[in-house]
Image (spheres, rainbow, N blue to C red):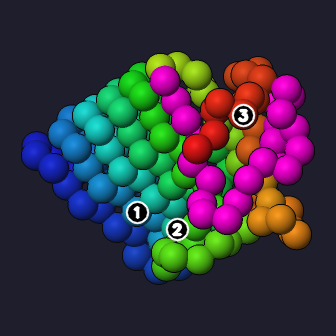
Amino acid sequence: GGVGSDTLVAGPAVSAQLFGGADPDVVTGGTGTADLRGEGAPDKLTAGTGPTVMNGGDGPDQLRAGAQTSQVTGELGDDTFMFGESFAGGAIESFGPSSITDFGIGADTVKLFTGLSVHTGLGTTAVTAWDGATDRGTITAANGHLWDVANFS
């Protein structure tokens, strides 16, 4: 992306590196491996269906993990990390083991999709989310943050 707000979307079945600019950006991965970066300002990054590394950069970012997301970084700002919504939207989706590298820098929160809640792991660095019957994915705080119920919305 360049000057001004950008919308960047990776194509199907390709590996992609998508970088937003200094202004608010919307960056979306595809079905291949993706490296998504927001850089400065409030950005919205959405993982596709392939393995994804996301970095929001400065500003309050919204980072929506996908089925195979492996590493998510918010950086500076009050970031929202979203888990469990299908790529198409509107339905619960299991998500791959994901790690947040810098949870707690700013007033960060984890938003679990409607119908999901923390099943196990409060007080540790790794929590498992479930839908009341099935475990849907694990979120690890790679920086050693111990999860608390107040971290989730």
Q: In this view, does 106 lie above or below 96?
A: above
Cα–Cα span, label 1 and label 3: 29 Å
Q: Which residue is drawn at 63% across and 40% down?
A: 152
Answer whether residue 6 is visible to the viewer in this image: yes
Cα–Cα span, label 3 and label 2: 28 Å
Percent across and percent down for residue 124 are 86, 28
The residue that mark 1 highlights is 28
Kind of element beneath mark 3: helix
Query: Could you say which disc has been placed on residue 9 in the image?
Result: none
Kind of element beneath mark 2: loop
* Neighbourhood count class around disc 1 (C-alpha, 10 Å): few under 14, some 14–19, many 20 upward: many
Q: Is residue 121 above or below residue 90?
A: above
**Badges 2 and 1: C-beta atoms under 8 Å apart?**
yes
The residue that mark 2 highlights is 48
Residue 99's quadrant in the figure? top right
- Residue placed most toward the observer, 84 or 35: 84
Q: Residue at x 87, y 38 (%)?
A: 121
**Image position of 142 (left or right of 16):** right
Cα–Cα span, label 2 and label 1: 6 Å
Q: In this view, does 111 lie above or below 100?
A: below
* Neighbourhood count class around disc 3 (C-alpha, 10 Å): few under 14, some 14–19, many 20 upward: few
Percent across and percent down for residue 105 are 52, 19
Q: Judge whether residue 114 is colored magenta.
A: yes
Q: Judge whether residue 135 is colored magenta.
A: no
Query: Could you say which disc has been placed on residue 149 in the image?
Result: 3
Q: Which of marks 3 and 2 is nearer the N terminus?
A: 2
Q: Residue at x 22, y 44 (%)?
A: 24
* Front label number (3 vs 2): 3
Answer whether residue 68 is visible to the viewer in this image: no
- Over which residues does the magenta segment extend? 107-128
Percent across and percent down for residue 137 are 78, 57
